């Protein structure tokens, strides 16, 4: 199966428009997650950076899409953001270094569980893509096609894509895609990568010899 890849801005905006997902909302979510990641310190738990990046990407996406009547689904502790007419859902995941590169074939950074595997199977059996093909009968809510918002923070840029997964490798990574919508890269602001520590307000302490 050949993967359809869109990376020209005009094509990206058109494809996202058919899905009902504004480009700026996805980019804001990716930035929110990155800022959450770099705000962690050595005193956080070892896995805090990755968790907060994923969580804040998800939260930003949900908060911005709520005004467009998108809903939430947390079944099985696998959070997705759901189209108001139940046409599709979006999950969030970190990707490997090939994320956001039109000539590459990315995968999720970590292996995924049974909920993702089920979604991938449903996607692979879909004969159409909502908004990107001629109008067809809407799939039942339980069988929604689920897109992944993949993100990756490079040394100088943030890369992301909204892609439809259709297969997983033997180790559980999502590694095959029917459709990839590559988002424009976002610069990494070096000033933001090292947040200033907060030592609290300055306090003057007077010291006097005890008599």
Image: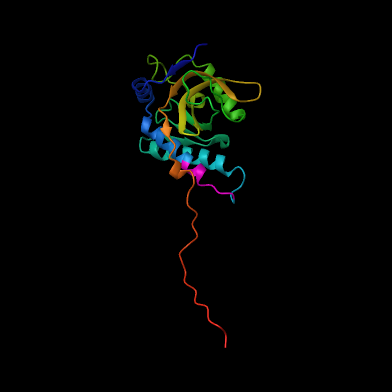
Q: Outermost residue, bottom direction? A: 211
Q: Is residue 41 magenta?
A: yes
Residue 72, image x, y percentages: 46, 36
Q: Is residue 21 magenta?
A: no
The magenta span reads: 35-42
169 relative to 129 in the view: left or right: right
Q: Outermost residue, top direction? A: 1
43 relative to 73 in the view: left or right: right
Q: Outermost residue, right direction? A: 170
Residue 185, image x, y percentages: 42, 29
The answer to whether any part of residue 42 appears in the image is yes
Quarter occupied by the C terminus: bottom right
Residue 203, image x, y percentages: 47, 69
| Residue at the (57%, 37%) spot, across then down | 77
Residue 25, image x, y percentages: 38, 34
- Coloring applied to the structure: rainbow
Q: How many marks?
A: 0
The one nearer the camera, 31 or 197, is 197
The one nearer the camera, 156 or 43, is 156
The answer to whether any part of residue 145 appears in the image is no
């Amino acid at each position: 199966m050949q993967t359809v890849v869109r990376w020209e801005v005009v094509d990206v905006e058109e494809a996202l428009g058919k899905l009902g997902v504004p480009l700026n909302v996805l980019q804001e979510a990716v930035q929110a997650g990155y800022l959450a990641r770099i705000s962690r310190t050595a005193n956080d738990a070892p896995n805090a950076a990755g968790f907060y990046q994923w969580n804040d990407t998800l939260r930003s996406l949900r908060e911005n899409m709520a005004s467009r009547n998108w809903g939430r689904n947390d079944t099985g502790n696998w959070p997705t953001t759901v189209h108001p007419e139940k046409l599709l859902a979006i999950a969030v995941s970190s990707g490997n270094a090939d994320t956001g590169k039109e000539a590459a074939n990315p995968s999720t950074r970590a292996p995924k569980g049974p909920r993702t595997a089920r979604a991938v199977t449903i996607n692979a059996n879909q004969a159409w893509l909502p908004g990107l093909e001629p109008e067809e009968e809407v799939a039942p809510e339980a069988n929604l096609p689920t897109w992944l918002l993949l993100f990756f923070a490079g040394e100088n840029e943030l890369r992301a894509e909204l892609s439809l997964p259709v297969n997983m490798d033997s180790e559980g990574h999502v590694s095959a895609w029917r459709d990839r919508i590559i988002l424009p890269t976002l610069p990494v602001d070096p000033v933001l990568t090292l947040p200033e520590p907060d030592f609290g307000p300055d306090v003057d302490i007077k010291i006097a010899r005890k008599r």
